[in-house]
Image: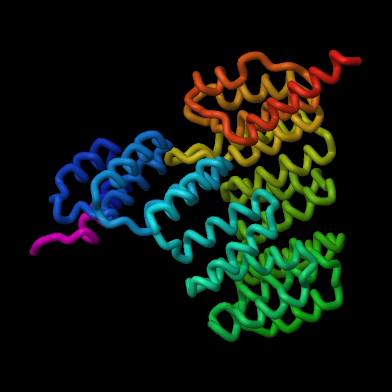
């Protein structure tokens, strides 16, 4: 029988899982022109992105756009997600402008990415604006949409709106009941409503199928309220129920310990995790590193950053980079240019581990130190990265402080 574009897409996917990128490219080249649709292109781009081959993925997107083939939000959303994760927000907004110019209608995933990106930037009003636009356009919101909006409502003090939306989630789709309840736990914890939190948990505890996620959310919520012993007791109950340590639960306890600077307890938990032959993941290390940064123990934070770099390098992904950014931004806040530069060179020297957002974090150290940096844009460009609006704003701050100093 003749394969269609879905068949070729899945063939590319499975080739990418088991073969080299050359195998994937050969497979793509064999797809008949008739079935070489955006689905197939999108899967090839996905294979490039998974291997950190961003330039190749971008070239393939340009080739797709020039091909005259049908275009939907699918490939654009993939790159919006990529740029958002890399904190290259200017590139994401340029892509959104291009979608608008081409009259490509955003779908649910597109709006979710745009809202998530606005949340990362702290632009809550902008995020809620995307939600209004989504609703007005008749695009169906999903559970992820609702979770983002509930968090936005909460951070804006719109508690009643958050609770109403959580109730609406359960009415629209009863299967979302657990997610809605988990979100409400977070709402109550963020607002310091201990009684409401415990009342909801008591009701949830009557369910026979409480998930590890729900236990993790409640543990973190207790931690936010400073109820560390209660969080530990709940973690023990969760462990008994699941028959052992579960990542979602032990990472929740790491969150609690890091939040309150109890790093001895965090390290003891890490030893238990390793003793049970479980692998600490990116979240585990991020909590530990964040905990030590809060205590101003930079050497310990760097020690665990090195460990995460050594143990969390798999399948072309770089899950330790989130922790690396925490360290660089901490050094930047102190204005410690020398340590920031040394850490930058030590941890990003090998492989394509740099990005505009990482350069911007480094540049903040110069801003806070009031130090001049020479040829920073040229340095970035030689490394294959172009400045964005944040870069230019930071360079302008350095120049302004330099001029102010010379006038005194």
Relative to the observer, which residue lies in front, 309 or 350? 350
> Residue 5 colored magenta?
yes
Q: Is residue 154 visible?
A: yes
Q: Is residue 15 left or right of residue 160?
A: left
Residue at point 65%, 51% (across, down) = 120
Instruction: Report the side of 119 relative to 109 (left or right).
Output: right
Residue 330: image quadrant is top right
Q: Residue 5, relative to residue 171: is it above or below?
A: above
Give percent across and percent down for residue 130.
58, 62
Q: Residue furthest left?
A: 1
- Let me know if residue 240 appears in the view: no
Q: How is the image coloured?
A: rainbow
Q: Nearer the viewer, residue 32 or 125?
A: 125
Task: Give left or right: position of 30 versus 366.
Answer: left
68 in relation to 300, above or below: below
In the figure, 265 relative to 186: above or below? above
Q: Nearer the viewer, residue 288 or 35?
A: 35
Measured as percent of width and height from the top left, residue 325 is found at 65, 36
**Position above or below: 6 against 337:** below
User: In the rendered structure, does residue 171 fall within the stretch colored magenta?
Assistant: no
Q: Which residues are magenta?
A: 1-11
Query: In which quadrant of the rendered view does residue 250 lie?
Result: bottom right
Residue 203 lies left or right of residue 99; in this view the side is right
Q: Residue 207: where, in percent of width, then height? A: 64, 83
Numbered disc total:
0
Main secondary structure along the magenta-highlighted residues: helix
Quadrant including the N terminus:
bottom left
* 236 or 160, nearer to the observer: 160
């Amino acid at each position: 029988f003749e394969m269609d574009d879905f068949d070729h897409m899945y063939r590319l996917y499975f080739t990418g899982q088991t073969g080299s990128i050359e195998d994937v490219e050969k497979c793509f080249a064999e797809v008949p022109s008739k079935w070489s649709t955006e689905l197939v292109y999108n899967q090839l781009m996905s294979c490039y992105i998974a291997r950190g081959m961003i330039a190749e993925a971008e070239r393939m997107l340009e080739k797709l756009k020039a091909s005259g083939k049908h275009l939907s939000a699918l490939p654009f959303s993939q790159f919006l997600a990529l740029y958002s994760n890399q904190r290259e927000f200017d590139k994401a907004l340029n892509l959104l402008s291009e979608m608008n110019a081409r009259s490509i209608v955003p779908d649910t995933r597109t709006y979710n990415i745009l809202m998530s990106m606005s949340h990362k930037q702290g632009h809550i009003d902008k995020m809620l604006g995307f939600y209004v636009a989504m609703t007005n356009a008749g695009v169906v919101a999903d559970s992820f949409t609702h979770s983002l909006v509930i968090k936005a409502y909460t951070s804006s003090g719109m508690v009643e709106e958050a609770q109403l939306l959580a109730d609406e989630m359960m009415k629209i789709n009863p299967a979302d009941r657990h997610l809605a309840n988990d979100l409400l736990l977070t709402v109550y914890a963020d607002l310091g409503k201990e009684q409401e939190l415990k009342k909801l948990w008591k009701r949830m505890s009557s369910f026979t199928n409480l998930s590890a996620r729900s236990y993790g959310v409640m543990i973190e919520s207790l931690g936010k309220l400073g109820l560390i012993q209660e969080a530990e007791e709940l973690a023990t109950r969760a462990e008994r129920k699941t028959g052992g340590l579960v990542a979602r639960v032990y990472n929740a306890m790491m969150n609690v310990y890091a939040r309150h600077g109890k790093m001895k307890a965090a390290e003891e938990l890490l030893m238990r995790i390793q003793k049970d032959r479980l692998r600490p993941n990116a979240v585990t290390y991020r909590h530990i590193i964040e905990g030590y940064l809060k205590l101003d123990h930079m050497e310990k934070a760097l020690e665990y950053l090195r460990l995460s770099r050594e143990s969390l390098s798999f399948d072309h992904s770089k899950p330790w980079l989130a922790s690396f950014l925490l360290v660089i931004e901490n050094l930047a806040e102190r204005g410690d240019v020398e340590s920031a530069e040394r850490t930058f060179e030590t941890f990003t020297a090998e492989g394509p581990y740099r990005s505009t957002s990482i350069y911007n974090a480094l540049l903040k150290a110069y801003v806070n130190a009031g130090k001049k940096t020479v040829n920073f844009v040229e340095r970035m460009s030689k490394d294959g990265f172009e400045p964005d609006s944040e870069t230019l704003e930071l360079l302008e701050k350095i120049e302004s402080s330099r001029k102010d100093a010379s006038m005194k």
